[in-house]
Amino acid sequence: MAERKAVLLRLDPAVHDALARWAADDMRSVNAQMELLLREALKKAGRSPKNAGPLPRRGRPKKID
């Protein structure tokens, strides 16, 4: 999997709070919720990148022995 990009995003506090509540309802982090929403918006607009990897799996990573 390619290295993930870090992005600084400034949000209105009320928007962040609403997003955080939505993410919690879906048992996701705010970051994962934002990525999901952005991917859906790209798909809806017909702009999905063909080389985008899958969404990372939710939950803790598997333990490596």
Image (cartoon, grey):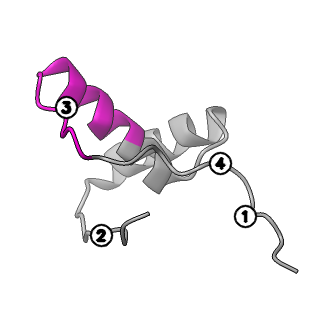
User: How far, Cα to Cα, is label 4 from label 2?
Assistant: 18 Å
Whichever of labels 4 and 3 marks the residue nearer the N terminus, that label is: 3
Of the image marks 3 and 1, the number of the one nearer the N terminus: 3
Q: Where is residue 36 in the image (x, y as percent from the top left)?
A: 40, 38
Measured as percent of width and height from the top left, residue 37 is found at 35, 35
Does 50 appear in magenta?
Answer: yes
Magenta region: which residues? Answer: 36-51
Vertical arrangement, residue 8 with respect to residue 53, above or below: below
> Residue 51 placed where, x, y %?
24, 46
Q: Distance between the residues labelled 3 and 2?
A: 17 Å
Residue placed at 81% from the left, 76% from the top?
64
Q: In 3D space, how far apart are the residues under numbered discs 4 and 3 (Cα atoms)?
A: 21 Å
In screen coordinates, is 45 left or right of 37? Answer: left
Q: Residue at x 36, y 67 (%)?
A: 2
Q: How far apart are marks 3 and 1 (CA)?
A: 27 Å
Which residue is denoted by mark 1 in the rendering? 61
Where does label 4 land, which residue?
Answer: 58
Residue 20: horizontal and vertical position, in percent?
51, 47
Q: In terms of depth relative to the viewer, which is nearer, 61 or 7?
A: 61
| Mark 3 lies on residue | 42
Of helix, strand and loop, which one carries label 2? loop
